[in-house]
Amino acid sequence: MTQRLNITNGDSAAGTLSEAGIEGKVISWRDVLHEGPVDSSLSLEELSKERAAFIAEQGWDDFAHVSGDFAERDRVIRHLDYFDEVVLWFEDDLYDQLQLIQLLDFFGRGAARGKTLSVIVVDGYIPPLSGADLKRLDDKRPRVTPQQLDLAKRAWKAFGSADPTSISKLLDEDTSALKYLASALTRHLEEFPSSTNGLSRSEREALTAIEAGRSTPVAAFLDAASKQDSVFLGDIVFYSYLERLSGKKDALVTWKDGTPVIAPTAETSREFVEGQLALTPLGREVLAGSKDWQSIHKKTRWLGGVEINPGEGGWRWDPSARRIVRLRPAKLRSASKLRPTKKLRSARKLRPVKKLRPVKKLRSAKKKARPAKKSKSRSPARRAPRRKK
């Protein structure tokens, strides 16, 4: 009898597949890859450790629990001896598409050699589908093509690159082999600080919702979710955005009494979601574009392979051109305008060439000169992954 392994995004979808009677073992991938550092050059197990550390650092799960979950799922897909087929069940949004390209990249490297590899991508959510709907999809499940494996490999490498323009270059190519990939990666790029006010799209939508009167965290979350073509963001991650926009100093949003917003724990979740939020005067200025959030706050953020440091320079999303651009700090821009080119030219004419270049001295200098030591490149300290559904 054929043994199947089904892999899907999270526990809710996994439960739906099991309840529908889908044949075989079902495992959840769970990782919120759109948040935190992702070095796509790492092995599966090395990356899982980094992701587990990040998730625990954010307070989204206990390190022992999440690292244990990741280690078990990695063990299953690393050793497919008991399975004849692997079926990937995913959705169309950013959360799922990143998991999908990670898995396709992994299996494309030979882990599924000799196995049947199939993929089912749902336009929307898996959980609302009936058992009959899921079985119809299962009966018609297509095999993964070489074109899909190749595209996923390039997309995963670009996502984990320190240069986000590698994603832009990929989007300029034909990505039709994976129907929803282009829209998902574009949504990822929109999370980079905007060139107009330094806010990511999610941050802007959160502040806009609060300004419009959706003043509880849950109301702001639902309003922001309604603006998405494909909802990918879970409420817990959204609440962490509110905390990032708050603080004791230079806050854009606070509770109505002026205290900083702190993302909830299991004990404080009810009190948190029913609290009343308010934009600060600075929050209104940033939202209007008269001030730049990146130049104000002091917090570092990772998106895929890119570390986004505070400051007016760095990688930005240009909403008008809908492209990633790199801004230079004003100090560098002004310095480049102050180059004394004319004085340099006149100075060159005055050089007493013959007196300054005696042949013997140059030769002896060469003997004494030592080559400069090459500085060792440092790999950035990665802070290493929270759940979606």
Image: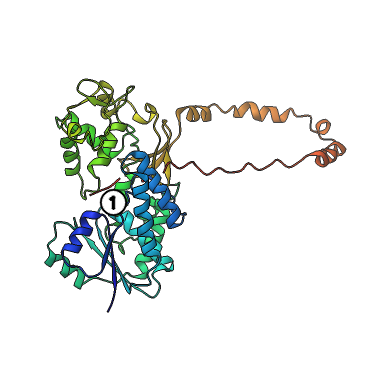
Taking depth in this image into account, of 257 and 196 the one nearest to the observer is: 257
Q: Is mark 1 on a helix, strand or loop?
A: helix
Looking at the picture, does residue 349 appear above or below residue 128? above
Residue 267 sits in which quadrant? top left
- Looking at the image, which residue is at 29% across and 60% down? 27
Image position, residue 338 (x, y; %): 54, 26
Residue 166 showing in the rendered view: no
Quarter holding residue 269: top left
Position of residue 382 relative to residue 112, above or below, is above
According to the image, label 1 marks what residue?
A: 94
How far across and down, in percent of the image, does residue 221 sit? 19, 39
Q: Please tell me in which quadrant of the rendered image residue 142 appears.
A: bottom left
Query: Taking 35 as reference, is 11 left or right?
Result: left
Q: Is residue 196 left or right of residue 127?
A: right
Horizontal and vertical percent position of residue 388: 25, 48
- Outermost residue, bottom side: 1
- What is the three-letter code of the residue carrying label 1? Leu
Query: Extreme right residue here?
Result: 360
Asked whether residue 19 appears in the rendered view, the answer is: yes
What's the image's color scheme? rainbow
Position of the N terminus by quadrant? bottom left
Residue that appears at 84% across and 41% down: 363
Rendered location of residue 101, percent (x, y): 35, 59
Near-viewer residue (104 or 22): 22
Does residue 227 appear left or right of residue 381 in this picture?
Answer: left
